[in-house]
Image (cartoon, helix red, strand yellow):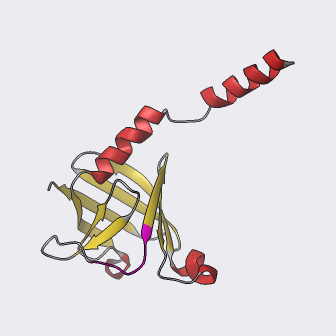
């Protein structure tokens, strides 16, 4: 019985998608430098000028000078496979999913370029960001 449970557990771990090393590499690419918006369609749905991802899974918007815009509430992100989820906690809990959550499909992630396609709330959003190293 124990061998059977162990083999099921091992099978589930080996079929879990991307390896932790690949996911760690993607996190390191996101957290390196500041991401400047190069293209955004539609224009008003983007991140403004840019965005900075931090190692503690928070994100910050940046102004035209590359300075981080401080916020009173936490903004967190998670990267799971090719899905980037961003949650802004400035909204109260009952509105957080409808107004404070953005979900993107990561079409390209390299040291220099990040391409996103909106999934939620607006699937027509596409953005291309370039990395501006610190």
Q: Name the residue: 45% across, 71% down.
A: 124
Question: Is residue 73 in the magenta section?
Answer: yes
Q: Name the residue: 40% across, 51% down.
A: 107
Q: Where is residue 19 in the image (x, y as percent from the top left)?
A: 49, 32
As drawn, 51 above or below 8: below
Q: Tell me if 125 is positioned left or right of 129 in this view.
A: right
Q: Tell me if 6 is positioned left or right of 72 in this view.
A: right
Q: Name the residue: 38% across, 78% down.
A: 45
As drawn, 104 above or below 55: below
Question: Is residue 86 in the magenta section?
Answer: no
Residue span colored magenta: 70-75
Using the image as rendered, state which of residue 128 and residue 54 is in the foreground. 54
Q: Name the residue: 38% across, 56% down.
A: 56
Q: Position of residue 50 (x, y in %)?
A: 25, 69
Give the main secondary structure of the magenta stretch. Answer: loop
Q: Quadrant of the N terminus?
A: top right
For the question of whether residue 113 can be seen, the reply is yes
Q: Where is residue 96 in the image (x, y as percent from the top left)?
A: 56, 78
Q: Tell me if 2 is positioned left or right of 23 in this view.
A: right
Kindly give the residue lying farthest to the top in the view shown.
3
For the question of whether residue 122 can be seen, the reply is no
């Amino acid at each position: 019985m124990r061998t059977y449970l162990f083999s099921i557990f091992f099978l589930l771990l080996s079929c879990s998608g991307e390896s932790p090393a690949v996911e760690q590499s993607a996190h390191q690419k996101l957290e390196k430098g500041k991401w400047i918006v190069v293209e955004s369609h539609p224009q008003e749905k983007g991140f403004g000028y840019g965005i900075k991802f931090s190692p503690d899974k928070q994100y910050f918007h940046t102004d035209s000078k590359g300075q981080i815009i401080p916020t009173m509430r936490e903004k967190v992100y998670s990267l799971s496979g090719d899905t980037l989820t961003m949650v802004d906690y400035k909204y109260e809990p009952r509105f957080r999913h409808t107004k404070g959550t953005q979900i993107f499909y990561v079409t390209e992630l390299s040291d220099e370029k990040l391409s996103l396609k909106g999934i939620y709330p607006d699937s027509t959003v596409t953005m291309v960001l370039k990395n501006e190293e610190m």
